[in-house]
Image (cartoon, rainbow, N blue to C red):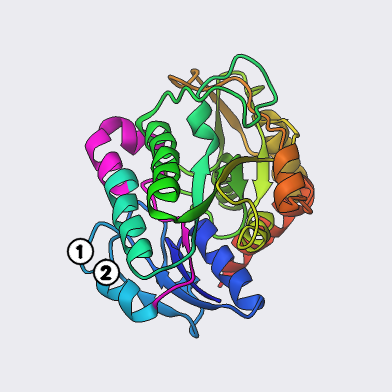
Amino acid sequence: MRIIVTGGAGFIGSHIVEEYLAQGHEVLVIDSLWEHGGGRRANIPDRVTFVPIDIRDKNLSRVFAEFRPDVVSHHAAQHSVAISSRDPGLDAEVNVVGLLNVLDNTVKVGAKKVIFASSGATFGHPESLPMTEATPQNPTSPYGITKMVAEHYLRFYKEERGLDFTALRYGNVYGPRQDPSGEAGVIAIFIGKLLRHEGVRIDWDGEQTRDYVYVKDIARLNVDALGRGSGECFVIGTGIKTSVNEIYRLLVELTGFEAPVTHGEKRPGDARDAQFDATLAHTHLGWRPQASLRDGMLETLRYFQKITTA
């Protein structure tokens, strides 16, 4: 199968590329390598065709016409909640206008499906947990809004253009290659700090929880979604809530360094808890997260130790 992965030089996208290659698919990567996006040329295997282009670029049509994909895995995005709040226009240009450019070109070349990286951010602050596909979507950030809007466009293109899709509402994805600076996941940030023997900052009381999903499990899911989950949106998580304090304590155990902790105020809009019931994803996509949090964090730590000493 011929697959285009947008955002394929990024944290999640690059793992998906590797998994597609392992399954024998032919892959082309599109990534703008935007400095705030996390895409790195070094994340792309040498045998993969790479086109450095923005998904908003009109020349995207030429890339699609020459490669003629069967499926498009759309993981390119403006993914920073903070940037989306500061510049909602930019967020909409990339996550909505860019999406439409991808969808139009996917239809033009006759590709049969798009796999879309949606987000648990579309739910905002739910009234009850765990979140399921039936949980009302009330996003509280421009980023969450654009991801929700994208799902509506996917439904439109399926109904009116005959383009199939599967949308995956990820929980908090972590693992090797995640950017440990700037607005990244807490696991990557803490690992970077502990390896440099620096202190960490824990906002609020640290008891706020998230549903952490290992990136290699996400990559395998994207293989399963190639032929399953037609026209549906799925929540993707482990069903396990883990607090920031628990993340800190486990990393102290794994690294042997008890980093000093500075406590900060609750961040505006920060949700208290997040947890997903991914029963439908299990039923329709075969979703089974394999990595325990401890094992996934240990692999992530080893990756950062390796690149730190390289």
Where does residue 190 sit, x and y in percent of width and height?
Answer: 59, 43
Where does residue 116 sit, x and y in percent of width and height?
Answer: 49, 51
Along the viewing direction, whichever of 181 and 3 lies nearer the viewer: 3
Residue at position x 55%, y 47% in the image: 231
Q: What residue range appears in magenta? A: 68-94
Q: Is residue 139 above or below residue 60?
A: above
Report, in whole angstroms, how far the alpha carbon at label 2 lies from the one at label 1.
Answer: 6 Å
Residue at position x 60%, y 39% in the image: 171
Query: Which residue is outermost to the top?
Result: 127
The three-letter amino acid code for the residue at tag 1 is: Lys
Q: Is residue 87 visible?
A: no
Res 58 label = 1
Query: Which residue is outermost to the bottom?
Result: 47
Q: Quadrant of the N terminus?
A: bottom right
Res 61 label = 2
* Residue 3 in the figure: left or right of residue 296: left
Dot 2 falls on a residue whose secondary structure is: helix
Residue at position x 38%, y 63% in the image: 106
